[in-house]
Amino acid sequence: MRTHKGSGLVNHAFQEDDLAKLKGNLGIGHTRYSTLGGTEHLNTQPFVVNMKHAKLALAHNGELVNASELRREVSMISLVKSFFSDVNLYLHIINNETEDNPDWPARIQNLMSRTKTAYSLLIMSGDTIYAVRDPYGLRPLCVDDECEGYVVASESCAFPSVSGKLLREVEPGEILEITKNGLRSICIVPRPSDQKMSLCIFEYVYFARPDTYMEGQMVYTARLECGRQLARQSPVEADVVSAVPETSTPAAIGFAEESGIVYREIFSKNRYVGRSFIQPSTRLRQLAVLKKFGPLSDNFKDKRIVLIDDSIVRGTTIAAIIRMLREAGATEVHIRIASPPLHFPCYMGINIPTKEELIANKLNADQLAEQIGADSLVYLTVENLEFAVRKHSNTDEKCGGHCTACLTGKYPVELEW
């Protein structure tokens, strides 16, 4: 297997000379957002290792909730140098199957029986790729067959760039096998009968790209509905509705349509600055905010603004934005958040590591409004968020559901440390 790894954006890490060396009829790749394990090059995926029966490559999206338990269970004879990465555990379990034969589907099923959530995996060996989604479906995974072959990705927005189109989502608990002979669903590993699917609701709030399809609907459509629900729930007298670009733009448009208040852009965004939430440190998040926005003051000078944001995590961004708007001439700034307050850390693949970092655990909405300089601040309720993401979806309510652990503290599985 040929491998290439690099840091930064994909178009920086993969130059034409690098791509020319990567010849073959199948492959897997990964763009890493660090949760556990840090950002060191040592943790860059996919990992490629020599197993007992073959060489194997594995890429992972998510975070394993029972990793500590598994580390206590197994004698960690590490196949790779990164002890902290969940991938090390996956590889160890796959390699140390009781039945010593190269039956990869059986080994993957054993892995899934021992790992609870949250993961989507791509596993490559020989001339076969396996696409795997955990039984709770917490992290997304989907497949396309309209290009020259098959493509599997976390989000369907990846497919048009290779002239593809979404075929379907990988089902929770499903193992898909992809070979030169086609696509085959091997099995679906069930979750406990009394538990529902738990797709991360934060995918809809922030994480997914708006042109991605999940549960039969475009993420943009769900965000638009969040804005409509927010306008019904928390109306306000104002002259202009706008958004903190860009994730919250659909919600702002929905709020404007429902309220009848005109929508205007009030920021010019520097598109060469990354998303501030996913920066790994507070210092980098603060620098990103300062570089990111320029006020379009003619659109709001001497006017009352309703500013829609998708979420408030640490409060790093919003205070600086409000100060910028007031200095540029806004008379009032009312904040409406298109999601509920975040109260609990995520242990399943989103970098919200401690309760102490979450501003909603320190201040209620009125206190936060005062601290950040807003005239008012209201969050969308959990009930209205759940209604918004289900309204246009194709999910059966009896078996479908969403993980709201960061909002409610109700984790889809019992956490063991």
Image (cartoon, rainbow, N blue to C red):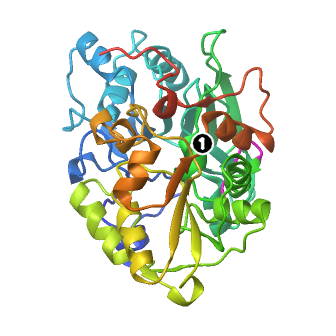
- Circle 1 crowding by C-alpha within 10 Å: few under 14, some 14–19, many from 20: many
Taking the spot 66% from the left edge, 74% from the top edge, the residue there is 239
In reply to whether residue 256 is colored magenta, the answer given is no
Q: Position of residue 160 (x, y in %)?
A: 68, 65
Q: Position of residue 130 (x, y in %)?
A: 55, 36
Q: Position of residue 212 (x, y in %)?
A: 66, 55
Q: Quadrant of the C terminus?
A: top left
Residues in magenta? 211-216
User: Which residue is the site of mark 1?
Assistant: 141
Taking the spot 33% from the left edge, 43% from the top edge, the residue there is 47
Amino acid type of the residue tagged 1 in the rendering = Leu
**364 on left or right of 222:** left
Taking the spot 75% from the left edge, 38% from the top edge, the residue there is 390
Residues 170 and 105: in front is 170
Q: Is residue 174 visible?
A: yes
Dominant SS of magenta comes to: loop
Taking the spot 32% from the left edge, 66% from the top edge, the residue there is 8
